[in-house]
């Protein structure tokens, strides 16, 4: 495994989780649905914990958590774009549109998070000792949370769009009501809901 790329992945993951905190804080300001607010509030707390875990991973792996890499700067720029999009939508004066943009921003951010932790899990399999144990332990905690963040928020986004389009919407979405944690379970929940629309 290439050490330089692993370092960059850890730093990109740390940067993305740090931006993720800001994304959730900003998205919460646009959330109108009380269930969505509660869910995102919980995800915000988990994301703050993910930052701490990645800082611990940096310490164990002897990675400077402040080191700037080209990949990390790209992650920061993408996050800044998502934050700006939410601010523009909120300033537009249409609360429903602002909520949709916030939801889409969270889905995009969670897609990157999901990938990062999947890659970190694979890296842990190729490490040894304390580094492997620390990374594996973090992945054991975070991966299921990231699955929930991604699949539930995708469901929210879809159902909020249905509602905005004047179509039958299921709020909260079936992914949340059925507590899905996998892509297969999310697809099943969506298919079952679509049969009853």
Image (cartoon, helix red, strand yellow):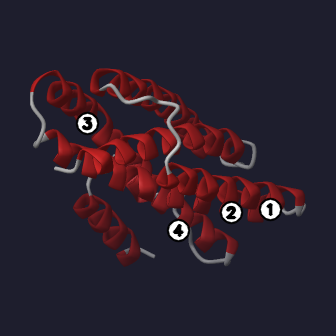
Residue at 64% across / 69% down in the picture?
163
What is the CA distance from the residue labelled 4 to the residue labelled 3? 28 Å
What is the CA distance from the residue labelled 3 to the residue labelled 2? 29 Å
Of the two numbered discs 4 and 3 on the same chain, state the one appearing first in sequence: 3
* Tag 2–tag 1 contact (CB < 8 Å): yes
Provide the secondary structure element on which disc 4 rests. helix
- Which residue matches tag 1? 89
* Tag 4–tag 2 contact (CB < 8 Å): no
Mark toward the viewer: 4 or 1? 1
Residue at 20% across / 27% down in the picture?
131
Percent position of residue 186, x then y: 32, 61
Mark toward the viewer: 3 or 2? 3
Q: Is residue 142 above or below residue 62?
A: below
Crowdedness near tag 3: few (<14), some (14–19) or many (≥20) residues, C-alpha within 10 Å: many
> In screen coordinates, is 86 left or right of 134?
right
- Residues 157 and 195: in front is 157
Provide the secondary structure element on which disc 2 rests. helix
Residue at 74% across / 49% down in the picture?
30
Q: Is residue 41 above or below residue 75?
A: above
Determine which of the numbered discs, if any, sits on residue 101 in the image.
2
Of the two numbered discs 1 and 3 on the same chain, state the one appearing first in sequence: 1
Mark toward the viewer: 4 or 3? 3
Determine which of the numbered discs, if any, sits on residue 158 in the image.
4
Residue 139 appears in the figure: yes
What is the CA distance from the residue labelled 1 to the residue labelled 3? 34 Å
Among the 4 quarters of the image, the one containing residue 77: bottom right
Percent position of residue 34, x then y: 64, 41
- Residues 3 and 134: in front is 3
- Which residue matches tag 3? 139
Of the two numbered discs 4 and 1 on the same chain, state the one appearing first in sequence: 1
């Amino acid at each position: 495994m290439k050490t330089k790329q692993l370092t960059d992945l850890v730093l990109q993951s740390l940067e993305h989780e740090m931006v993720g905190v800001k994304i959730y804080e900003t998205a919460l300001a646009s959330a109108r649905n009380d269930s969505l607010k509660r869910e995102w509030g919980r995800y915000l707390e988990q994301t703050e914990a993910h930052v701490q875990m990645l800082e611990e991973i940096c310490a164990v792996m002897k990675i400077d958590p402040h080191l700037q890499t080209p990949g990390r700067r790209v992650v920061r720029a993408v996050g800044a774009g998502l934050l700006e999009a939410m601010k523009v939508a909120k300033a537009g004066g249409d609360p429903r549109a602002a909520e949709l943009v916030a939801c889409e921003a969270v889905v995009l951010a969670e897609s990157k998070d999901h990938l990062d932790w999947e890659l970190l899990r694979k890296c842990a399999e190729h490490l040894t000792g304390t580094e492997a144990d620390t990374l594996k332990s973090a992945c054991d905690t975070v991966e299921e949370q990231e699955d929930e963040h991604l699949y539930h928020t995708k469901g929210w986004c879809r159902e909020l769009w249905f509602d905005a389009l004047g179509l039958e919407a299921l709020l909260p979405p079936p992914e949340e009501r059925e507590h899905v944690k996998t892509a297969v379970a999310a697809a099943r929940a969506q298919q079952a809901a679509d049969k009853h629309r």
